Image (cartoon, rainbow, N blue to C red):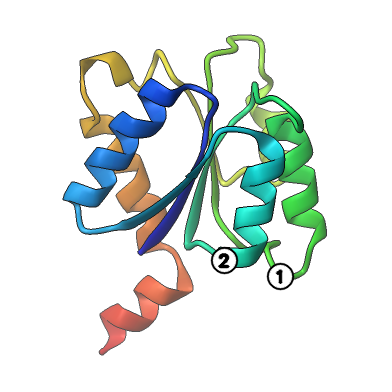
Amino acid sequence: MNILIVDDSRFLRLANERALVRAGHSVISASDGEEGLRLARERMPDLIVLDMMLPKLSGQEVLHALRGDPQTAGTPVMVLTSLPQCNEDRLKGEGATSYHQKALLELDKGTTHFMEVVERLLARTPKAKAAAAH
């Protein structure tokens, strides 16, 4: 599957990218919201992992733009944030497929939980369902 990671933290981008590649996924990454939105529209990933605190366009602005574009409206978006004050219900209401605080995913202790969430989200995509049917 093709996954887009949009995060301004180089460390987290690289750690998550390595874990995804090891699991057999193709990964593209962006370090700011503008680049992330452009890549989402150009590359049509199967899943977008989106940070909320981004330069140029915030994660929330990217999420709104993705959901407002018929081409990307159905793409699952896994929101990752280090902000404890983000409202999970509001973000899901605005189109986030799942929401996770980075600290609760224990990204500093490895990527196991992150990968479990990613695989669960990917299993629900039309591409995965079609592959499972064959």
Q: For the residue marked with disc 2, what is the amino acid?
A: Met
Counting residues from the start of the chain, the first of labels 2 and 1 encountered is: 2
Residue 3: image quadrant is bottom left
Q: Residue at x 36, y 72 (%)?
A: 128
75, 13: nearer the viewer: 13
Is residue 8 positioned above or below 34 on the image?
A: above
Residue type marked 1: Gln
For mark 2, what is the residue? 44
- Quadrant in which the C terminus is drawn: bottom left
Q: Position of residue 23 (x, y in %)?
A: 19, 52
Q: Is the Cβ of the residue at disc 2 closer than 8 Å to that at disc 1?
A: yes
Q: Position of residue 34 (x, y in %)?
A: 72, 41
Q: Position of residue 100 (x, y in %)?
A: 48, 27
Q: Residues within 10 Å of mark 1 (few under 14, many from 20)?
A: few
Furthest residue toward left? 22
Q: Residue at x 24, y 50 (%)?
A: 21
Quickly name the residue at label 1: 71
Q: Residue, x 21% and y 23% (percent of image)?
A: 110
Q: Nearer the viewer, residue 70 or 117?
A: 70
The furthest residue to the bottom = 134
Q: Is residue 99 visible?
A: yes
